[in-house]
Amino acid sequence: MKNTPTAKLLISFFNIRKRILMPENEFFLNENDIRIYSIYLPDFADLKSDLAEYLNVKELPLSSNLYMKMNHEFIIYRSILKIILAAYSKLDAKKMEFDYHLYKKPYLASKPWLHFNISHSEDYVVIAISRRNLGIDIEYIAQDFPFTNLIPEVFEEREIIAIHNSKDKKRLFYSYWTRKEAFVKGLGTGINDNFKHIPCADGEHIIDAALSEDTKNWHVCNFNLSDHYMGAIACEFSSAFSKDIVIYTVPNDMNALRKMIND
């Protein structure tokens, strides 16, 4: 009888050493590279009209049906996502269209090697890209959010005990939550009935076949985006997390953005 292959999930916390402006002309990915790009939405409000030029006819109706604030936010982060992907893929950002997996995870059919994921919370958006499958999540740590009501619904007993025994219950809650979110976004399944059973405590875990039939190993890592934002990134296992991970700050300058794709 053959042994059934099992996949492992390694979970840890990672302190990002620094956040720097996005480098020029460095749009190449090695096998283990993971790049994270940070967008502080209020800084891009005046660029909305210029950025809207990168949305196609399928995307513009979508943005116009949202509330005014969400309309602006969608135009900003969708356009910047397309610009960043165009810089790596050499595709035309204005003609770029996304395909979607079963659970609506987007991908580029013509560039299947270029994996990406995006997360939005309050004033921040983060975009992660790699040659490996990945997922990312950020959450604003709201002061008045009644997070304790969710604890029994989304965590198993040992995780609940850890949160209750923590000196900073809210921060550990968001740490655990973002780990789960990043992992399911990486798998492309989204939140479902198995969400509660996804491991989120520090250490190495076996991935139950009910959670994923994939036998690839994964690494999930927390990071601090800012004082009031917790983030997590999940990636098919590589040596990338043994290196410094830097979040690049996207410049709020159209000339700099256009220069990325020689537009």
Image (cartoon, grey):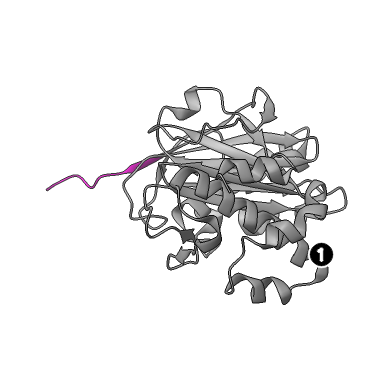
Farthest residue toward the front? 263
Q: Residue at x 63, y 51 (%)?
A: 80
Span shown in magenta: 1-8
Does residue 24 appear to the left or right of 99 in the view shown? right
Residue 178 part of the magenta segment: no
| Vertical comparison of 13 with 140: above or below | above
Q: Residue at x 55, y 45 (%)?
A: 261
Farthest residue toward the right? 144
Amino acid type, callout 1: Lys
Q: Nearer the viewer, residue 128 or 217?
A: 128
Does residue 158 appear to the left or right of 41 in the view shown? left
| Vertical comparison of 141 with 153: above or below | above
Residue 2 part of the magenta segment: yes
Q: Position of residue 253 (x, y in %)?
A: 74, 43
Q: Position of residue 213 (x, y in %)?
A: 33, 55
Q: Position of residue 13 (x, y in %)?
A: 60, 30
Question: Is the magenta region chiefly helix, strand or loop?
Answer: loop
Q: Residue at x 68, y 28 (%)?
A: 20
Q: Secondary structure at mark 1?
A: helix
Q: Position of residue 47 (x, y in %)?
A: 77, 53
Q: Quadrant of residue 36?
A: top right
Disc 1: which residue = 69
Does residue 239 appear to the left or right of 172 in the view shown? left
Label total for image: 1
Residue 183 in sight from this viewpoint:
no
